Amino acid sequence: MKFPLSSAVIGSVLVLACSPSEPQLSHADALKATALSLAALTEQNAQFEQFKNAFLEETWSLYPNYGVYVGYYQHDGELTVPNAEFKQRETEYLQGNLAKLKEFDVALLSAANATDLALIQNQLESSLWYNNTLKSDEWDPSNYNVAGVFGLILNTDYKPLDERLLTIKQRLSKVPEYYVAAQQNITVPTLEHTDLAIQQSQGALGVFEKSIPESLVKSTLSAEQKLAFSPLLHEAVNGIKGYIEFLQNKRSILVDGGAKDFRIGAALYEQKFKYDIVSDYTAKELYDKAVIAKQQLHSDMIAITKQLWPTYFADEPMPAIELVAVKQLIDHLSVQHVKREDFVDEIRRQMPIIEEYIIEKDLLDLDPSRPLVVRETPEYQRGVAGASVNAPGPYDATANTYYNVTPLDDYTEEQAESYLREYNHWVLQVLNIHEALPGHYAQLVHANKSPSKIKSIFGNGAMVEGWAVYSEKMMLESGYGNNEPEMWLMYSKWNLRVVVNTILDYSVQALGMTKEQGLDLLINQAFQEQTEAEGKWRRATLSQVQLTSYFNGFAEIYAFREELKDKMGDKFNLKDFHNKFLSYGNAPVPVIRKLMLAELGLK
């Protein structure tokens, strides 16, 4: 296989051939040196390809759950117990592969392989940091939940139902041991993560008390085979219930004091940001950039409000405090929303309309053979986000992508109305663009076609979330919503959420922001409804850094697009940019930028 000469190798050859301080090489010697360099390149890249294959096989053997999520089913019957033995195996895997990476000369690798190496290195170093420094396995009980993979095996038709049920039976035997290990790992948890773990574990019971038994009835397994599930399901349910009881007892002890603070502090936050986001910014730099972006969005929204005020409040003077006027207009418009009972169905209705628009405007290549299924969020996944996407991995790229939408069944009338005002007529469309088309769903379909499994598997959250946010603005720029000022106002409110996510997360985790201050930021400065603001505050207490990924990725993608426009001039094509950008899988934006510029011959 041929690989392009890296800049370092080219440079060394030129020095050998042309340095005036040394005897110049003959033409034959120069050709010989070039041939040796090409041979070294070929050998080094071939060895790295072998390493990647072995590394991935070792990864799926150690993390069979992760393998199932990316569509690698060879170890689907194995359930890893997070005990001391596993932790030792994991440490050896992480340290051993980091040592192997050092054997490669990055200067001799192709650009694609050099970036794969960097991604693997970041993944390994990040895992070591999580295990040895952050240690969330000791204070975040929501890390332990077996339901997700059981549900995925049950709902993915990668082999006949009977075979999948027998796989589930094999895994069931380890569930009690899994939860014993989980209890041993938890030392002093946070109250916030304990409450989340209790909620999600209670939701997990449905998989074992309802979903699996219902599938057994539908199967063609013999009566004897079906009967053999009963004691295993019973023990699994008892294991989960025992974990819930353990957490409830922990909570009763810690509720009056002694629980771990959910805030990780500025120093850990900056480190986690480096590993999770892989950005050209530091966490503090991104926070400062977000503060400026908030001010610009406020200015834009004030201008739109002045334009629309006579239309909606003809006989009423505009308030002197301009942000009060913006909020009044948003509140007035937000009453236009779908009925509570129609929320999930309305999302289903909108998807083909948005898809038709993308095709008509020729914005991005879509693949109708990769199905998108809108469904109610499984109970074991609820409690963090109201909408999300579960996409298949690159090993099973044709499986369904699920757009999870949480129904409003558990909300009071007041909470439901607040939620629906937040996701009003205009914002619901932007949500669908973000989560599905041309956002997460479209991006992940492209990612699964990337020639680099490394870039697809070890996905960069800032690129994934950033693309979804970028797609929102791109769609409106292309004319979606007919350039209605109402749509732009609501989009600006939605985009303000992205910006404020960064401000909130950094302020809460690194600067000690209180709940009162956080809700003021969300409600009075970002114009969010009470229910949405309360949910976002909760999310900021349950995660760290992830909320910054939206703004970071968006800022880097949008800046890169504008950079290419300037450099390419009339040769720039938006659809080509989208297809090429997404072809690199889920790599960090700075990595994609470097590869694309090199491929296009630009600097």
Image (spheres, rainbow, N blue to C red):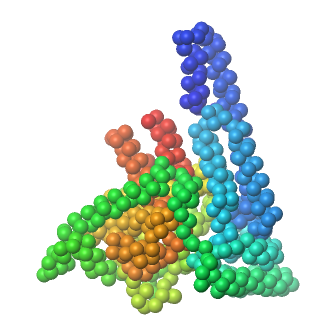
Residue 493 screen position, x and y as percent:
34, 69
- Residue 199 shows up from this direction: no
Look at the image and tell me in which quarter the C terminus lies. top left
**Residue 507 visible to an observer of this rendering:** yes
Where residue 213 appears, as percent x and y from the top left, is 73, 85
Q: Residue drawn at (37%, 39%), measured in percent from left and top?
A: 567
- Identified at 40% across, 66% down, the residue is 500
Determine whether 205 is above or below 160 in the image. below
Q: Is residue 305 left or right of residue 567?
A: left
Q: Is residue 481 above or below residue 270?
A: below
Q: Position of residue 554 (x, y in %)?
A: 43, 56
Residue at 68 percent of width and 59 percent of height:
132
Number of residue marks: 0
Quarter of image, res 50 = top right
364 and 64: which is toward the camera: 64
Up the image or down, 533 lies above or below 570; here it is: below
Pick the quarter of the image with the N terminus. Answer: top right
Camera-side residue of 283 and 219: 283
Using residue 559 as the reference point, say whether residue 168 is left or right of it.
Answer: right
Outermost residue on the front side: it is 257
At horizontal 33% and vertical 66% (from top left) the residue drawn is 492
Residue reaching furthest to the bottom: 413
In the image, 584 versus 349, the foreground residue is 584
Q: Position of residue 123 (x, y in %)?
A: 64, 53
Question: Quick check: 77 above or below 52?
Answer: below
